[in-house]
Protein backbone atom coordinates (compact mmCIF):
# COMPACT_ATOMS: atom_id res chain seq x y z
CA UNK A 1 0.00 0.00 0.00
CA UNK A 2 1.32 3.48 -0.84
CA UNK A 3 2.17 5.74 2.09
CA UNK A 4 0.06 8.51 0.61
CA UNK A 5 -2.62 7.73 -1.92
CA UNK A 6 -4.64 10.25 -3.90
CA UNK A 7 -7.54 10.12 -6.32
CA UNK A 8 -5.94 9.18 -9.63
CA UNK A 9 -7.74 11.82 -11.68
CA UNK A 10 -7.56 13.65 -13.94
CA UNK A 11 -10.47 15.89 -13.12
CA UNK A 12 -11.92 17.98 -15.93
CA UNK A 13 -14.56 20.42 -14.72
CA UNK A 14 -16.29 23.54 -16.05
CA UNK A 15 -15.69 26.94 -14.51
CA UNK A 16 -17.79 27.44 -11.44
CA UNK A 17 -17.94 23.76 -10.54
CA UNK A 18 -17.18 22.35 -7.12
CA UNK A 19 -14.56 19.65 -7.02
CA UNK A 20 -13.27 17.47 -4.19
CA UNK A 21 -9.99 15.62 -3.91
CA UNK A 22 -9.37 12.78 -1.53
CA UNK A 23 -6.20 11.48 0.03
CA UNK A 24 -5.47 8.62 2.42
CA UNK A 25 -2.28 7.95 4.36
CA UNK A 26 -1.07 4.71 5.83
CA UNK A 27 1.13 5.76 8.74
CA UNK A 28 -0.88 6.47 11.87
CA UNK A 29 2.08 8.41 13.31
CA UNK A 30 1.60 11.08 10.66
CA UNK A 31 1.50 14.47 12.26
CA UNK A 32 1.42 17.24 9.70
CA UNK A 33 -0.72 17.44 6.60
CA UNK A 34 -0.66 19.80 3.67
CA UNK A 35 -2.08 20.43 0.27
CA UNK A 36 0.36 21.81 -2.27
CA UNK A 37 -0.31 22.78 -5.84
CA UNK A 38 2.14 22.26 -8.62
CA UNK A 39 1.95 23.92 -11.99
CA UNK A 40 3.56 22.23 -14.98
CA UNK A 41 7.36 22.09 -14.58
CA UNK A 42 7.27 24.33 -11.52
CA UNK A 43 7.98 23.78 -7.86
CA UNK A 44 5.28 22.68 -5.41
CA UNK A 45 3.71 25.62 -3.59
CA UNK A 46 1.79 25.41 -0.37
CA UNK A 47 -1.94 25.77 -0.84
CA UNK A 48 -2.94 25.15 2.74
CA UNK A 49 -2.08 23.26 5.87
CA UNK A 50 -4.69 20.82 7.12
CA UNK A 51 -5.77 20.88 10.74
CA UNK A 52 -7.87 18.48 12.76
CA UNK A 53 -10.59 21.08 13.09
CA UNK A 54 -10.68 21.61 9.35
CA UNK A 55 -9.81 24.90 7.76
CA UNK A 56 -11.06 27.16 5.06
CA UNK A 57 -9.34 29.74 2.92
CA UNK A 58 -11.68 31.48 0.54
CA UNK A 59 -12.93 28.93 -1.98
CA UNK A 60 -10.76 26.16 -0.53
CA UNK A 61 -11.69 23.91 2.37
CA UNK A 62 -9.48 21.19 3.82
CA UNK A 63 -10.59 18.45 6.17
CA UNK A 64 -8.69 15.87 8.17
CA UNK A 65 -10.10 12.67 9.63
CA UNK A 66 -7.43 11.06 11.77
CA UNK A 67 -9.53 8.04 12.62
CA UNK A 68 -9.94 7.18 8.94
CA UNK A 69 -6.50 8.55 8.01
CA UNK A 70 -8.11 10.63 5.34
CA UNK A 71 -7.63 14.16 4.06
CA UNK A 72 -9.78 16.08 1.62
CA UNK A 73 -9.66 19.30 -0.34
CA UNK A 74 -12.77 21.01 -1.64
CA UNK A 75 -12.60 23.74 -4.25
CA UNK A 76 -15.74 25.77 -4.79
CA UNK A 77 -16.51 28.00 -7.77
CA UNK A 78 -13.56 26.69 -9.79
CA UNK A 79 -11.55 29.20 -11.81
CA UNK A 80 -9.44 28.60 -14.89
CA UNK A 81 -6.42 29.49 -12.77
CA UNK A 82 -7.13 26.54 -10.47
CA UNK A 83 -5.91 24.21 -13.21
CA UNK A 84 -2.88 22.46 -11.72
CA UNK A 85 -1.80 19.27 -10.01
CA UNK A 86 -2.78 19.07 -6.36
CA UNK A 87 -0.41 17.23 -4.07
CA UNK A 88 -1.33 15.68 -0.75
CA UNK A 89 1.69 15.83 1.56
CA UNK A 90 2.15 14.10 4.90
CA UNK A 91 4.91 14.35 7.47
CA UNK A 92 5.51 11.76 10.15
CA UNK A 93 6.37 12.65 13.70
CA UNK A 94 10.09 12.36 14.41
CA UNK A 95 11.11 12.11 10.76
CA UNK A 96 13.04 15.35 10.71
CA UNK A 97 10.23 16.83 8.70
CA UNK A 98 10.58 14.44 5.80
CA UNK A 99 7.52 14.92 3.65
CA UNK A 100 5.89 12.14 1.70
CA UNK A 101 4.04 13.21 -1.40
CA UNK A 102 1.08 11.61 -3.05
CA UNK A 103 1.18 11.08 -6.79
CA UNK A 104 -0.94 14.19 -7.29
CA UNK A 105 -4.34 14.76 -8.84
CA UNK A 106 -4.52 16.87 -11.95
CA UNK A 107 -7.35 19.36 -12.29
CA UNK A 108 -8.28 21.07 -15.53
CA UNK A 109 -10.92 23.78 -15.33
CA UNK A 110 -12.47 24.55 -18.69
CA UNK A 111 -14.37 27.66 -19.81
CA UNK B 1 9.06 37.85 0.61
CA UNK B 2 12.03 35.53 1.27
CA UNK B 3 12.38 32.59 -1.05
CA UNK B 4 14.53 29.56 -1.71
CA UNK B 5 16.78 29.96 -4.72
CA UNK B 6 18.50 27.29 -6.78
CA UNK B 7 21.23 27.32 -9.40
CA UNK B 8 21.58 26.45 -12.17
CA UNK B 9 18.05 26.26 -13.50
CA UNK B 10 19.14 23.65 -16.04
CA UNK B 11 22.23 21.46 -16.02
CA UNK B 12 23.20 19.18 -18.88
CA UNK B 13 25.96 16.67 -18.24
CA UNK B 14 27.49 13.54 -19.66
CA UNK B 15 26.94 10.19 -17.96
CA UNK B 16 29.68 9.54 -15.40
CA UNK B 17 30.35 13.21 -14.72
CA UNK B 18 30.01 14.85 -11.33
CA UNK B 19 27.43 17.59 -10.82
CA UNK B 20 26.80 19.97 -7.96
CA UNK B 21 23.39 21.50 -7.54
CA UNK B 22 23.21 24.61 -5.41
CA UNK B 23 20.52 25.98 -3.17
CA UNK B 24 20.22 29.00 -0.91
CA UNK B 25 17.53 28.28 1.68
CA UNK B 26 15.54 30.99 3.43
CA UNK B 27 17.91 32.64 5.87
CA UNK B 28 16.31 31.83 9.23
CA UNK B 29 15.36 28.29 8.33
CA UNK B 30 16.98 25.37 10.11
CA UNK B 31 15.91 22.26 8.20
CA UNK B 32 16.92 21.63 4.62
CA UNK B 33 15.81 19.05 2.11
CA UNK B 34 16.42 17.73 -1.36
CA UNK B 35 13.67 16.12 -3.43
CA UNK B 36 13.63 14.93 -6.98
CA UNK B 37 10.87 14.57 -9.54
CA UNK B 38 11.38 12.47 -12.64
CA UNK B 39 9.31 13.84 -15.53
CA UNK B 40 5.70 12.77 -15.18
CA UNK B 41 6.24 11.14 -11.80
CA UNK B 42 5.74 12.08 -8.16
CA UNK B 43 7.98 14.19 -5.97
CA UNK B 44 10.37 11.88 -4.08
CA UNK B 45 12.27 12.62 -0.88
CA UNK B 46 16.05 12.31 -1.07
CA UNK B 47 17.54 13.70 2.13
CA UNK B 48 16.96 15.97 5.09
CA UNK B 49 19.68 18.00 6.80
CA UNK B 50 19.72 19.66 10.19
CA UNK B 51 22.44 20.98 12.46
CA UNK B 52 25.09 20.27 9.85
CA UNK B 53 24.32 16.62 9.43
CA UNK B 54 21.98 14.34 7.55
CA UNK B 55 18.84 13.59 9.55
CA UNK B 56 17.31 11.10 7.19
CA UNK B 57 17.85 9.80 3.69
CA UNK B 58 15.87 7.66 1.30
CA UNK B 59 16.92 4.56 -0.60
CA UNK B 60 17.50 6.75 -3.63
CA UNK B 61 20.22 8.66 -1.78
CA UNK B 62 23.01 6.13 -2.23
CA UNK B 63 26.79 6.55 -2.07
CA UNK B 64 26.75 8.55 -5.28
CA UNK B 65 24.95 11.39 -3.52
CA UNK B 66 26.23 13.76 -0.89
CA UNK B 67 25.06 17.01 0.66
CA UNK B 68 26.95 19.83 2.21
CA UNK B 69 26.38 23.18 3.80
CA UNK B 70 29.79 24.70 3.15
CA UNK B 71 28.94 28.12 4.57
CA UNK B 72 26.07 29.83 6.31
CA UNK B 73 23.95 30.19 3.23
CA UNK B 74 24.52 27.51 0.58
CA UNK B 75 23.21 23.96 0.64
CA UNK B 76 24.53 21.69 -2.09
CA UNK B 77 23.70 18.31 -3.56
CA UNK B 78 26.52 16.48 -5.29
CA UNK B 79 26.09 13.51 -7.58
CA UNK B 80 29.48 11.91 -8.03
CA UNK B 81 29.01 9.88 -11.18
CA UNK B 82 25.76 10.67 -12.91
CA UNK B 83 23.62 8.01 -14.56
CA UNK B 84 20.96 8.40 -17.20
CA UNK B 85 18.27 7.69 -14.61
CA UNK B 86 19.42 10.67 -12.53
CA UNK B 87 17.76 12.92 -15.10
CA UNK B 88 15.05 14.72 -13.16
CA UNK B 89 14.03 17.99 -11.59
CA UNK B 90 15.76 18.45 -8.26
CA UNK B 91 14.02 20.63 -5.69
CA UNK B 92 15.57 22.10 -2.59
CA UNK B 93 13.27 22.97 0.31
CA UNK B 94 13.66 24.53 3.72
CA UNK B 95 11.64 25.13 6.83
CA UNK B 96 12.19 26.78 10.17
CA UNK B 97 10.24 24.17 12.10
CA UNK B 98 10.14 20.58 10.87
CA UNK B 99 6.43 20.37 11.59
CA UNK B 100 5.57 23.33 9.39
CA UNK B 101 5.27 23.67 5.66
CA UNK B 102 8.36 23.49 3.54
CA UNK B 103 9.22 26.16 1.05
CA UNK B 104 10.50 24.91 -2.26
CA UNK B 105 12.99 26.42 -4.63
CA UNK B 106 12.24 26.63 -8.37
CA UNK B 107 14.26 23.48 -9.04
CA UNK B 108 17.21 22.48 -11.18
CA UNK B 109 16.45 20.39 -14.23
CA UNK B 110 19.26 17.86 -14.60
CA UNK B 111 19.67 16.16 -17.96
CA UNK B 112 22.18 13.32 -18.18
CA UNK B 113 23.18 12.35 -21.70
Image (tube, coloured by chain):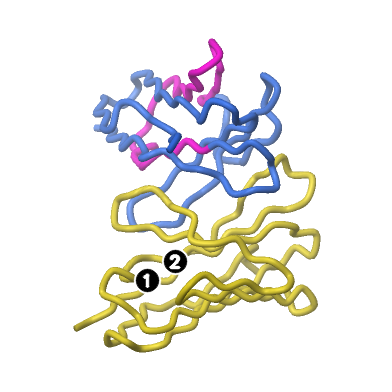
Chain colours: A yellow, B blue
Counting from the top left corner in percent of width and height, residue B87 is at 34, 39
Residue drawn at x 35%, y 74% is A107
Determine which residue is flagged by label 2: A86
Residue drawn at x 67%, y 19% is B52
* Chain of the residue that carries numbered disc 1 in the rendered image: A
Tags 2 and 1 touching, CB below 8 Å: yes
- Asked which quadrant contains residue B4, the reply is top left
Counting from the top left corner in percent of width and height, residue B45 is at 56, 44
Q: Element under label 2? A: strand
- Asked which quadrant contains residue B62, the reply is top right
Quadrant assignment for the N terminus of chain A:
bottom right
Quadrant assignment for the C terminus of chain A:
bottom left
Q: Element under label 1? A: strand
In the image, residue B3 sits, relative to residue B50, either above or below, namely below
Segment tinted magenta in the rendering: B64-93
Residue drawn at x 63%, y 65% is A50
Determine which residue is flagged by label 1: A106
Between B80 and A94, which is closer to the camera in this rendering?
A: A94
Between B53 and A38, which is closer to the camera in this rendering?
A: A38
In the image, residue B10 sits, relative to residue B98, either above or below, namely above
In the image, residue A52 sits, relative to residue B91, either above or below, namely below
Amino acid sequence: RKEVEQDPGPFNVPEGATVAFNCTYSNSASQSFFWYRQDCRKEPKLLMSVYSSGNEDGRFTAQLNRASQYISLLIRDSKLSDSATYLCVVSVRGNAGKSTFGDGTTLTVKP
Amino acid sequence: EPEVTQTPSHQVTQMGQEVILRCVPISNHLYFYWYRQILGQKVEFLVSFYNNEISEKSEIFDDQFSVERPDGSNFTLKIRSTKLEDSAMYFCASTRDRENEQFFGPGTRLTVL
